[in-house]
Amino acid sequence: MTNGYIEEMLGDNERILLVTRQHGFVLFGHIVLEIILTLLIIAGITALTAVYPQAIVGYVLLLVPLIGMVRDILVWSNRQYIVTNRRVIQVSGVFSKEVLDSSLEKVNDVKMSQSFLGRLFDYGDIQILTASEQGADQFRSIGDPVKFKTAMLNAKERFSFDEVGVRAQMEEDIPSLIAGLDDLRKKGIISDEEFQQKKTELLSKM
């Protein structure tokens, strides 16, 4: 599920193809100690209240692991990995947001690695090699990595195809644009110098 913040980041005609997060095991690894601490506090205070009823106030100690657990859940749920028809985006942060994205045009290769447990429980690491200065993006322990990789490669292929199509259309239109400029020159609407300048600019795009 996406939120308004992600929607606001999208450009014109850009659409979301896939959203995923780190696998639930990552979240569990962060909160397991907090769960154990919560159970120990409950067991300890329950045992004490049988002898000292006033010990019930000790339940306030539950706020410590519970607050930590809520924080970990919010951090996990707000770290999202998104594939659009133009780029790959990583968003993290609960209140302050950090956004990293790579244009599909700059993606050179995608590597996926899964351990035995990763294949069994459907999680793995994705490494995106790009032509940008940062070189590579690491998405660790994400859920359904095969689907993520497939969605990204398919989006890159469609993006490349669309770019070729647009470029071919422009090249087909350039001669007609030059002819139209020549008509304007003959009618005296633009000068010979302006015509040559525009003609040179159009030919450089072929």
Image (cartoon, grey):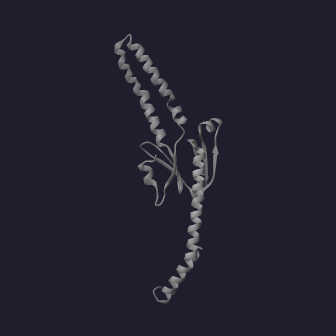
Image coords of residue 19 (percent x, y): 51, 47
The reply to whether residue 136 is in sight is no
Measured along the vertical axis of the image, is residue 192 above or below residue 156? below
Figure quadrant of residue 70: top left
Image quadrant occupied by the C terminus = bottom right
Image coords of residue 51 (percent x, y): 38, 10
Q: Residue furthest left?
A: 54
In this view of the protein, which residue sits in the foreground, 121 or 79? 121
Q: Residue furthest top?
A: 51
Residue at figure coordinates x 43%, y 42% from the top left: 94
What is the number of callouts on the image? 0
Residue at figure coordinates x 45%, y 32% from the top left: 69
Image coords of residue 176 (percent x, y): 54, 80
Measured along the vertical axis of the image, is residue 120 above or below residue 178? above
The reply to whether residue 44 is in sight is yes
Position of 27 compared to 60: left or right? right
Image coords of residue 78 (percent x, y): 46, 42
Position of 67 compared to 160: left or right? left
Residue at figure coordinates x 54%, y 55% from the top left: 87
Measured along the vertical axis of the image, is residue 177 above or below residue 120? below
